[in-house]
Amino acid sequence: MKSVIKAISYYLPKKIVDNEQLTVEFPNIKIRELTRLTGVHKRHIAAEYETSVDMGVKAAEKLFNENNIDPRDIDFVLFCSAGGDYITPASACVVHNMLQLSQNCAALDINQGCTGYLYSLSLAHSLINNSNAHNVLLLNSEAITKMIHPADKANRAIFGDAGAATLVIASDDDKRKGGRFLFGTDGSKFDRIIIRHGRERFPLDKYREDDFIDSFGNVRNQACFYMNGSEVFNFSVKKAPELVQQLLDVYQLKMGDIDLFVFHQANAIILETIGRKLKIPNEKLVVELENTGNTVSATIPIALKNVLQKGRLRRGMNVLLAGFGVGFSWAGTIFEF
């Protein structure tokens, strides 16, 4: 049994912060240079009481309404996020209740950031391939801006909030490409993208949270999001090309056989550098973060939806997906859309 992406929808919060607004808050910010490097012109910000669960549910409701999907047909819901409403129960159970899914539907959380969409897709494929599910709802939702320090101008310029919903269904079309995923992890770099305080090792009630200035002049706090930008860049532009070649070898394909390359939408300079290293034609390289920013695990489904609406993605195309980042982790697959 094969798995097929049936539909994708996404939700963006109402509040928008564009680059002009950032210059008001940070008069010394080099906005032109920053825009060129990030590729981001505006980003959506979750409301004060709006969580990743809320955004995931709104994305799912859009998916159901736009594609005439009966929620009672969903037999597995996967919620992928670095956030969530509670430590326990799983946010997927909260989503299950809010969407009024069937009691015969399983619910599971995945805490995996930049590679989260690939992990979600892989798990959905395995469930379907083993006949343990037929209609899997993937929710990739991130309210990352809530964890970024208000004075952290670098990360505030890159990241945005969003929720994405993907329906993966069973198909008896055994000729369709897909099903193999490649994964990798370099756990020695776990602290290059991190929110250090707030869980069991560094509980907030035992550690005083003081702001400090790092060596680059950025305001930091151990309870807020941190990213070592230079190391993330070097890792991404080295690992992504290696991953692409490994995927092509596994599928016994050549670069010219791929119709679209959809990488995690980290920032423009990373995507452009990967594109140059692999000599990917511009029309095959997807860059879709101008109006949303880096939305972590939601970037790939948002990019897929955008290129689908623009007519760049059509049924029968060979699509390569690749994620890389937090962990450090990487993952990829090739499939026929």
Image (tube, rainbow, N blue to C red):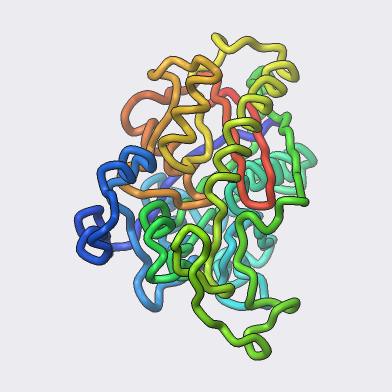
Which residue is outermost to the bottom? 205
Give the quadrant of residue 286: top left
In-front residue for pair 330/164: 330
Residue found 73% across the figure and 16% down from its top: 249
Left or right relative to 5: residue 148 = left
In-front residue for pair 246/36: 36
Image spot of residue 312 (x, y percent): 37, 24
Q: Quadrant of the N terminus?
A: top right
Residue found 60% across the figure and 53% down from its top: 113
In-front residue for pair 207/127: 207
Image spot of residue 2 (x, y percent): 68, 31
Residue found 57% across the figure and 75% down from its top: 223
Which residue is outermost to the right? 130
In the rendered image, the vertical position of residue 214 relative to residue 327, given as above or below: below
Left or right relative to 232: residue 41 = left
Number of dots carrying numbers: 0
Q: Is residue 98 visible?
A: no
Which residue is outermost to the front? 215
Give the quadrant of residue 209: bottom right
Image spot of residue 210 (x, y percent): 53, 82
In the rendered image, the vertical position of residue 156 relative to residue 49, given as above or below: above
Q: Is residue 142 visible?
A: yes
Residue found 38% across the figure and 71% down from its top: 150
In-front residue for pair 287/53: 287
Image spot of residue 279 (x, y percent): 50, 15
Give the quadrant of residue 322: top right
